[in-house]
Image (cartoon, grey):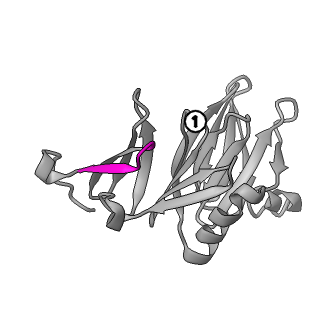
Amino acid sequence: NVTDLLRLENNIVICTIPGLVIYNRENQKLKGFWQYNLENQRIKQYLADQWVTSLNILRSKEICVGTNKGLSRLVLNGTTGEFLIHPLTDAFTDIQKLITLDNWEINKIHEDRAGILWFGTTKGLIRLDTSSVSMSKWTQEDGLCNNNVLSIEEDNHGYLWLSGTDGLSMMDPATYVIKTFNESNGLPKVKHW
């Protein structure tokens, strides 16, 4: 089950339920990095969980990996093809607690043009400012179309577009004003599977 893809230099990083897979476009080979791998026990350190749901390359060139049980920060060594682990800093402590203790599973990670990290989760939207170590969260009660934020895209005006299972929300990250689009606004009726 492939959940996300990311182009990284000459590689395609693939999120899967058992872990990360890297496809090297030069040698056309796949290399897996699983949370649990009997051949190489240190692989366990890479990921917070084997159910990898999202990843994003940050401005710092780190890869922020979202899983069902937390975050991991990695850097790919271009020479060896191995991941180097970056420990979670204080900025990530609150979000890690929220994810692990309250089961806010990560669906999508987005870094906006101001360097703020946004996490679409199964229980809402999280904003993380790593420079001030501040975190905020929004749910359906705050105006989101629903709590399951599946995708985050930023438009040319800096607005965040958030897809959910019951519609679409647009947030102005400067004012945190949310506008929701659903069937009443002309969005086609969503049929749940």
- Residue tagged by mark 1? 114
Q: Is residue 91 magenta?
A: no
| Residue segment shown in magenta | 173-180
Q: Residue at x 74, y 50 (%)?
A: 73
> Picture quarter containing residue 93?
bottom right
The vertical placement of 100 against 152, above or below, is below
Q: Residue at x 87, y 62 (%)?
A: 41
Q: Position of residue 186 (x, y in %)?
A: 12, 45
Q: Residue at x 76, y 64 (%)?
A: 36
Locate the C terminus by quadrant: bottom left
> Picture quarter containing residue 7?
top right
Residue 189 relative to residue 55: left or right: left
Residue 121 can be seen in this image:
no
The vertical placement of 102 against 12, above or below, is below
Residue 108 relative to residue 65: left or right: left
Residue 75 can be seen in this image:
yes
Q: Residue at x 40, y 31 (%)?
A: 155
Q: Position of residue 75 (x, y in %)?
A: 78, 41
Q: Is residue 179 magenta?
A: yes
Mark 1: give few (<14), some (14-19) or many (20+) Cα within 10 Å. few
Residue 153 relative to residue 133: left or right: left
As helix, strand or loop, the secondary structure at mark 1 comes to: loop
> Picture quarter containing residue 45?
bottom right
Q: Amino acid at mark 1?
A: Ala
Which residue is more in the foreground, 24 or 180? 180
